[in-house]
Image (cartoon, grey):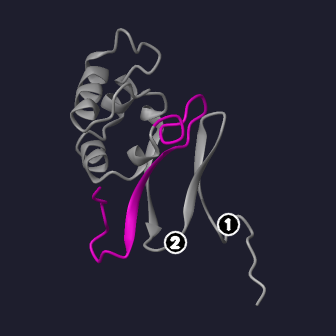
Amino acid sequence: MEYYYNEDKTKVAVLVSYGFGAGWSTWNDKCLAYDKRVVEFWLDHNTVEFCHSVDAHSHSHPTAAGEIVNNFLESCGYQGTYLGGYGDIELEWVPCGTPFRITEYDGNERIETLDDAGFMVIN
């Protein structure tokens, strides 16, 4: 898998959804959060109108925008992706080499690093 880096390749892009209800990265394959193809697609379609018109609650009858997203994700090998949280996606930059995870509470996601989690090292 390829990743999407900033210009000087010191940080990697990670997509997370900050809204409540459904998590984009945590309710699907975690690779959706940092797959370069998905990040580029989101950047190319990142308008409020498009993102909020992706109907997450109608998986069997998606909106036109939902169809576009589903078709793209399926072309990347992501089958049956739940589109909840898509309207609340934001791009975050994580320094390369930094261990991180995406945590979620009621759909509200956030990036957590070892430092954020209070891990300590005693030598």
Residue drawn where x is 67% and y is 66% of the image: 116
Query: What residue does disc 2 label?
Result: 98
Query: What residue does disc 1 label?
Result: 116
Depth-wise, is mark 1 or mark 2 nearer the camera? 2
Q: Amino acid at mark 2?
A: Thr
Q: Is residue 70 left or right of residue 21?
A: left
Which quarter of the rendered picture does the C terminus lie within?
A: bottom right
Query: How many C-alpha atoms fall within 10 Å of the one at disc 1: few (<14), some, or many (≥20)?
Result: few
User: How far is mark 1 from mark 2, CA to CA?
Assistant: 11 Å
Q: Main secondary structure of the magenta part?
A: loop
Residue drawn where x is 28% and y is 34% of the image: 73
Nearer the observer, 122 or 102: 122
Q: Which residues are magenta?
A: 1-28
Instruction: Give the number of callouts.
Output: 2
Nearer the observer, 2 or 69: 2
Tell me where residue 102 appears, x and y as whole percent.
Answer: 57, 51
Tell me where residue 87 appears, x and y as whole percent.
Answer: 43, 33
The relative height of residue 117 versus residue 109 in the rendered view (above or below) is below
Q: Amino acid at mark 1?
A: Asp
The relative height of residue 81 versus residue 123 in the rendered view (above or below) is above
